[in-house]
Amino acid sequence: MKLKKKSMSRAFTMIELIFVIVILGILASVAVMKLNATREDAQISSISGRVSAILGEISSHAVASATLDGNVTHYSNIAQEMVANGEATVENTADTTRLKIRAGEVPECLVLKIIHSVTEENLSLEMNSDENDYVCRGVQRQLADRNVTLRIRGRIAKY
């Protein structure tokens, strides 16, 4: 007597394929979220580094020339590049120069302000604290220790 061998299918069932697709979808969504967070962290580091460099360039120019008259883009190549790329805007008035720096979706996340008068000049970095943008908040956290006014020229004691 001959035994017949049962022909067993070696293919995956439809339910097994659906489970695999669902698991791959979950893994992909986690990977995309991690990628976005990494991209935003890179933006935070980039903007923070450029703002620190701008502050250094302006301070160096102030020490070398003992004055800061004119546009902020004359003192800093990085500021000039940021303005050209639309990442910052410059606003000049009679006694104040402002470099408004975009971070994330916030057009004025940081404002680098130079106040110049006949007797003194001050450089300060102001932070717009009303925004909830992740990139803006991250940049502000990294630059929190630079949120002071730097006296460039003038006297501290007032008579």
Image (cartoon, rainbow, N blue to C red):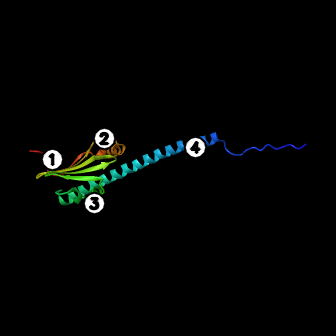
**SS under mark 2:** loop
Q: Amino acid at mark 3?
A: Asn
Name the residue tied to disc 3: 77
Residue appearing at x 32%, y 54% in the figure: 50
Q: Residue at x 40, y 48 (%)?
A: 40
CA separation, marks 3 and 2?
Answer: 28 Å
**Element on which disc 3 rests:** helix
Asked whether disc 2 touches disc 1, contact meaning CB atoms under 8 Å apart, the reply is no
Return the x and y of residue 15 as percentages of the image width and height.
63, 39
The quadrant of the image that shows the C terminus is: top left
Name the residue tied to disc 4: 21
In the image, 120: left or right of 29? left
N-terminal label among 4 and 1:
4
Q: Are marks 2 and 4 in contact (CB under 8 Å)?
A: no
The mark that comes first in sequence, 3 or 1, is: 3
Q: Which mark is residue 146?
A: none
- Of tags 2 and 4, the one toward the viewer is 4
State the separation of the CA atoms marked 2 and 1.
34 Å
Q: Amino acid at mark 2?
A: Glu
Does dot 1 land on a helix, a strand or a loop? loop
Eye-nearest disc, 3 or 1? 3
